[in-house]
Image: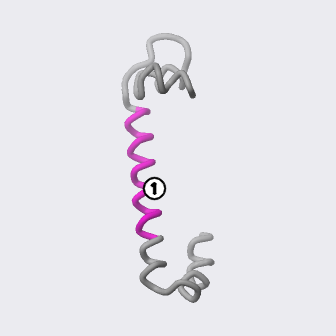
Amino acid sequence: MILFIRFSWCVGTVGLLPSLGAVVLSGVCQMLSASSLCAVATNGLVTRSGGAYVMLVKSIGAAAGGAV
């Protein structure tokens, strides 16, 4: 919603093509985030306690999961 309210200001400030580029870039980031979340959520059954932490460790590894 905020994107469409501020879009006319962005077009007036930087132009049409950079504004459309920003919209496309934000859409790409949104799709990558959504697909990453889906990959983490469907990684498999959690057989022990720990919940989200165990899912993250299984998905991204113990070294990176420990930092979370």
Residue that label 1 marks: 30
Region of the chain picked out in magenta, as a range: 23-41
Query: Residue placed at 47% from the left, 63% from the top?
Result: 26
Queried whether the magenta region covers residue 31, the answer comes back as: yes
Q: Is residue 22 above or below residue 13?
A: above
Question: Does 3 sit left or right of 20 as displayed?
Answer: right
Q: 47 or 60, which is in the foreground?
A: 60
Quarter of the figure with the C terminus: top right
The image's colour scheme reads one colour
Query: Residue placed at 48% from the left, 27% from the top?
Result: 64
Q: 37 or 67, which is in the foreground?
A: 67
Queried whether the magenta region covers residue 35, the answer comes back as: yes
Question: Does 66 sit left or right of 21 as displayed?
Answer: right
Query: Residue placed at 37% from the left, 23% from the top?
Result: 44
Residue 48 lies, in percent from the top left, at: 49, 10
Residue 12 lies, in percent from the top left, at: 57, 89
How many other residues sit within 10 Å of disc 1, few (<14), some (14-19) or many (≥20)?
A: few
- SS at badge 1: helix
Q: 48 or 15, which is in the foreground?
A: 15
Quadrant in the picture for residue 52 = top right
Q: Is residue 37 above or below residue 66?
A: below
Q: How many marks?
A: 1
Query: Residue placed at 54% from the left, 21% from the top?
Result: 66
Query: Residue lying furthest bottom in this view?
Result: 12
Q: Is residue 21 above or below residue 34?
A: below
Residue 39 lies, in percent from the top left, at: 37, 36
- Name which residue type carries label 1: Gln
Quarter of the figure with the N terminus: bottom right
Residue 31 lies, in percent from the top left, at: 40, 54
Q: 58 or 67, which is in the foreground?
A: 67
* Dominant SS in magenta: helix
